[in-house]
Image (cartoon, rainbow, N blue to C red):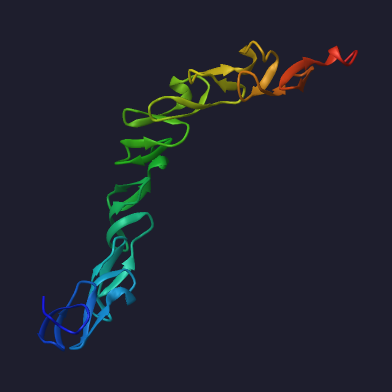
Amino acid sequence: MCQSAVTYCTLCTSNTACTQCQDGYYLASATSCLSCNTLTGCLNCAASNNCTLCASGYYLSSGTCYVCPSNCSACTSSTSCTACNPQFYLSSTTCLACEDTLIGCHSCSSNAVCLSCGGGYLLAGSTCSPCSSTLPACSLCSAAGVCQSCQQGYYLDSGSTCKLCSSSATLSNCLLCNSSSVCQYCQTGYYLASNLCNLCSSVLSNC
């Protein structure tokens, strides 16, 4: 490290004569180190129009950084990916969506190995299965296999199990509910009052 008056200078022959700049800067003159960030996607450069190292998501071609193809996190050209963004996997030199080949998959390492599943699915080995396949009537579950939300017509009890609305002692004739004591919609012939289903004929004769 030289003791130079030139900002961002790392090598110099005198206090005012710089010969090399810090990474991310280029030598514009013996007295000036300028930033490479004027070049899109460039980390290091040799001149104002000559990049030597590109940021992630870009590839270098003839001193210029170009954006990688869609869904690529790293690439060597406009048609060759070497790594993919989350939710995609590398197939040869192309990034393909995990969910296109693995139903319910959120992230994967290949077209046969899922790493995490999307909402409503549970990871079983290397594939995703609907929550309801192991947790009856469950529409959303955690990675640990605990139900978090139920299908319509069911409510989630204290044991994280989905129970039919009408199975609750207080919700007979209920079609839709959000708990064991709060009905939202009743069966035909019943009306909703105070979160419970009441027989229409009890207040309306011949109903």
Whether 166 is drawn above or below 91: the answer is: above
In the image, residue 112 lies at what x, y percent? 31, 36
Q: Quadrant of the C terminus?
A: top right
Whether 33 is drawn above or below 182: the answer is: below
* 31 sits to left or right of 98: left
Q: Quadrant of the N terminus?
A: bottom left
Residue 69 or residue 149, whichever sits in front: 149
Numbered label tally? 0
In the image, residue 181 lies at what x, y percent? 64, 19
Residue furthest out toward the right: 205
Q: In which image quadrant can residue 34 be found?
A: bottom left
* 10 sits to left or right of 42: left
Residue at figure coordinates x 60%, y 22% from the top left: 179
Residue furthest out toward the left: 13
Q: In which image quadrant can residue 167 be found?
A: top right
In the image, residue 186 lies at what x, y percent? 72, 21
* 147 sits to left or right of 201: left
* 12 sits to left or right of 109: left
Q: In which image quadrant can residue 121 be found?
A: top left
Whether 143 is drawn above or below 62: the answer is: above
Report if residue 167 is visible in the image. yes
Residue at figure coordinates x 72%, y 19% from the top left: 196
In the image, residue 42 lies at what x, y percent? 28, 70
Report if residue 46 is visible in the image. no
Residue at figure coordinates x 48%, y 17% from the top left: 159
Whether 42 is drawn above or below 192: the answer is: below
Residue at figure coordinates x 18%, y 85% from the top left: 5
